[in-house]
Image (cartoon, helix red, strand yellow):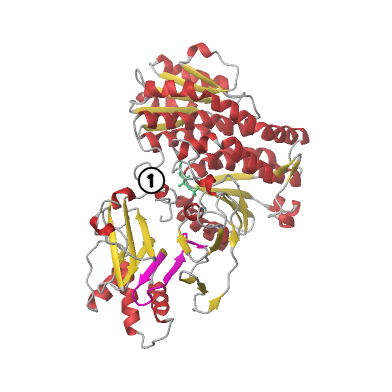
């Protein structure tokens, strides 16, 4: 249940006791499991469990994990996708196996059984060899937990491109897809590389490499306390995470900006003036909210470092043969560090000779294993599906990185850099100020929660903020929303504006504010209700609601301006009685493409 936030549609559990594997599973929430007759029959002190997000086959009891092999000797839960499952299924059918689900996963326990029976050995590694042979024949991504009558006190786990961590306890050991899920039991974790096999029992953890040679691994101690992954008195994780942004930002800044000095020891001397000035371009590649961070900081990097910046969606970048070479720096943003498309884009960039930096919040996540350099945001665990503090902490981090590069390059005015740094250090206090708009936003949310469409407008950096505001709203309130560069609206989409439609305007760029005001005037004339987020000198009387945010350097204004928009989507979702933390169809970590 601690992994529910990742998004799922079915849940299941299998335990092993006295040579018998018992399974309880069904579509729907984890809490439904408590009432199943099958759950009451579960026995034992070793078990595997899963929350499924349907890929192959509809959400149903049969398609839920764990899956058993035909002889009911092996149970498996699987995250990821097996791309060659049809040919493997056909091979197994030819060998007498039958299948009851539509999933790709069901082939895995059967394949293990198949290889197990073909192995003449009788030693302790027989099951592990069968698992290895199975994994060697799988194409795709997987993290697997395997339970078997053949080794009743043990569990085997392995990962390839899907997350999995092992937690070391005392007389007990744990496996999970994510650190926060087991943080209240242990702080000592083993982080696994692809194709590392783990044989666990209550008192023992053994690691094997791809060739099944035993290897030793060090634990990583996680310093987050378990509270950080709890709701801490808040109604929802999302509200907690919005409210803790001052703290999260403080942590991000604290690790990177020491007074006036930027600190990126991870990048060391490789990022010399010579290297940075040899760059033809920087790519920022990411998905969803993280990609919106890229849009916010593109202008900052170009302005301060005088290097051309392209921002790309990872799922597009990876398939379009981008112009990337050793004169390119590729930066990958990912809160979870597990997003399949972002990781694939990173691998492609490396193949093409680029230097790669991963910026992530999750220590030891897959992306950090692939990138040349990894920089952590230190924002604390983000549990709500809708990303909030990860966004603001990434914008802060990327802005400090831009300053760091500009200082090495000598491309920006010293006084400008000093001013931005001063503004960055003031951000936590200013976010606290912005959070006071809570009540005003709640009132507006009550007014518009039944709307069908909402439009978000802005220019320049404000357009990037508008995009993120729009994404937040549709994700958790299910209201259709779109964002536009304010000047683009009249080239077609203004046809959608009619009496009563809600328009949200963002105006933090003093050079563009007058233009945006004119565009919003145009929608007001056509009957729109308006909410404006601004720190500029504007005539407030023309708008229905104006949320004043503190003045700040325009480069860091997204960090303040997004907060009222996060709250707006939160309160609309609450007003509609929706599950804020677990919006429909969405998963926290998108580990499949
Ligand atoms: C939006 C949201 C998603 C993620 C996207 C990338 O609220 O959470 O759009 O931003 O799936 O995820 P990460 O940053 O983990 O790569």
Above or below, 276 against 412 in this view is below
Q: Position of residue 521 (x, y in %)?
A: 47, 16
Above or below, 411 against 460 in this view is below
Q: Position of residue 298 (x, y in %)?
A: 59, 40
Task: Look at 48% across and 37% down and name the residue there.
Answer: 233
In the shown orientation, is residue 562 left or right of residue 448? Answer: right
Above or below, 414 against 315 in this view is above
Q: How many marks?
A: 1
In the shown orientation, is residue 463 left or right of residue 476? Answer: right
In the shown orientation, is residue 493 left or right of residue 70? Answer: right
Residue at the extreme bottom of the image, as rendered? 120
Q: Position of residue 161 (x, y in %)?
A: 46, 62
Task: Look at 50% across and 56% down and name the residue there.
Answer: 185
Secondary structure, magenta segment, majority class: strand
The quadrant in which the C terminus is found is bottom left
Query: Does any portion of residue 106 appear in the rendered image?
Result: no
Confirm or reject: label 1 Cβ below 8 Å from ligand 1: yes
Q: Position of residue 112 (x, y in %)?
A: 34, 75
Q: Which residue is mark 1?
A: 586
Q: Nearer the viewer, residue 229 or 492?
A: 229
Q: Is residue 151 magenta?
A: yes
Task: Look at 47% across and 45% down and name the residue there.
Answer: 383
What SS does tag 1 mark?
loop
Q: Nearer the viewer, residue 376 or 215?
A: 215
Q: Residues within 10 Å of mark 1 (few under 14, many from 20)?
A: some
Q: Is residue 139 magenta?
A: no
Residue range in magenta is 144-168
Query: Does any portion of residue 573 appear in the rendered image?
Result: yes
């Amino acid at each position: 249940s601690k992994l529910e936030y990742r998004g799922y549609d079915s849940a299941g559990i299998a335990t092993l006791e006295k040579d018998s594997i018992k399974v309880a599973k069904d579509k729907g929430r984890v809490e439904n499991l408590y009432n199943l007759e099958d759950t009451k029959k579960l026995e034992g002190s070793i078990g595997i469990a899963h929350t499924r997000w349907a890929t192959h086959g509809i959400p149903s009891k049969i398609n839920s994990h764990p899956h058993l092999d035909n002889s009911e000797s092996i149970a498996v839960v699987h995250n990821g996708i097996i791309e060659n499952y049809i040919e493997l299924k056909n091979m197994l059918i030819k060998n007498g196996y039958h299948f009851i689900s539509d999933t790709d996963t069901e082939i895995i326990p059967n394949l293990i059984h198949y290889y197990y029976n073909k192995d003449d050995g009788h030693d302790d590694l027989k099951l592990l060899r069968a698992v290895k042979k199975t994994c060697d024949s799988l194409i795709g991504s997987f993290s697997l937990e395997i339970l078997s009558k053949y080794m009743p006190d043990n569990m085997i786990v392995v990962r390839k491109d899907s997350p999995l961590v092992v937690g070391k306890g005392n007389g007990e050991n744990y496996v999970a897809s994510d650190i926060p899920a087991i943080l209240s039991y242990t702080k000592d974790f083993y982080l696994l590389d692809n194709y590392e096999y783990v044989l666990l029992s209550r008192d023992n953890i053994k690691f094997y490499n791809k060739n099944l040679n035993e290897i030793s691994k060090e634990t990583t101690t996680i310093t987050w306390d378990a509270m950080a992954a709890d709701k801490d008195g808040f109604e929802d994780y999302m509200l907690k995470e919005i409210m803790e942004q001052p703290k999260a930002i403080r942590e991000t800044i604290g690790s990177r900006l020491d007074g006036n000095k930027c600190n990126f020891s991870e990048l060391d001397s490789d990022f010399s003036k010579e290297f940075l000035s040899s760059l033809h371009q920087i790519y920022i590649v990411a998905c969803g909210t993280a990609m919106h961070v890229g849009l916010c900081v593109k202008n900052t990097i170009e302005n301060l470092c005088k290097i051309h910046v392209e921002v790309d969606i990872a799922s597009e970048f990876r398939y379009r043969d981008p112009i990337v070479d050793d004169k390119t720096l590729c930066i990958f943003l990912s809160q979870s560090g597990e997003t399949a498309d972002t990781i694939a884009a990173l691998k492609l960039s490396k193949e093409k000779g680029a230097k790669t930096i991963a910026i992530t919040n999750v220590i030891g996540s897959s992306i950090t294993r692939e990138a040349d350099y990894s920089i952590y945001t230190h924002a604390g665990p983000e549990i709500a599906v809708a990303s909030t503090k990860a966004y603001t902490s990434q914008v802060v981090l990327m802005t400090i990185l831009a300053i760091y590069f500009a200082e090495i390059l000598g491309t920006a005015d010293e006084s400008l850099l000093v001013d931005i740094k001063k503004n960055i250090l003031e951000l936590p206090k200013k976010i606290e100020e912005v959070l006071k708009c809570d009540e005003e936003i709640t009132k507006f949310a009550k007014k518009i929660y039944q709307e069908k469409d909402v439009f978000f407008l802005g220019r320049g950096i404000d357009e990037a903020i508008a995009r993120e505001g729009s994404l937040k709203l549709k994700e958790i309130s299910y209201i259709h929303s779109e964002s536009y560069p304010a000047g683009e609206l009249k080239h077609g989409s203004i046809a959608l504006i009619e009496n009563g439609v809600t328009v949200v305007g963002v105006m933090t760029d003093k050079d563009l504010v007058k233009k945006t005001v004119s565009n919003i005037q145009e929608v007001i004339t056509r009957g729109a209700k308006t909410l404006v987020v601004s720190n500029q000198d504007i005539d407030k009387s023309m708008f229905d609601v104006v949320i004043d945010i503190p003045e700040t350097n325009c480069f860091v204004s997204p960090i303040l301006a997004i907060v009222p928009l996060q709250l707006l989507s939160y309160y609309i979702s609450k007003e509609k009685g929706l599950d804020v933390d677990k919006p429909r169809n969405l998963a926290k970590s998108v580990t499949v493409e």
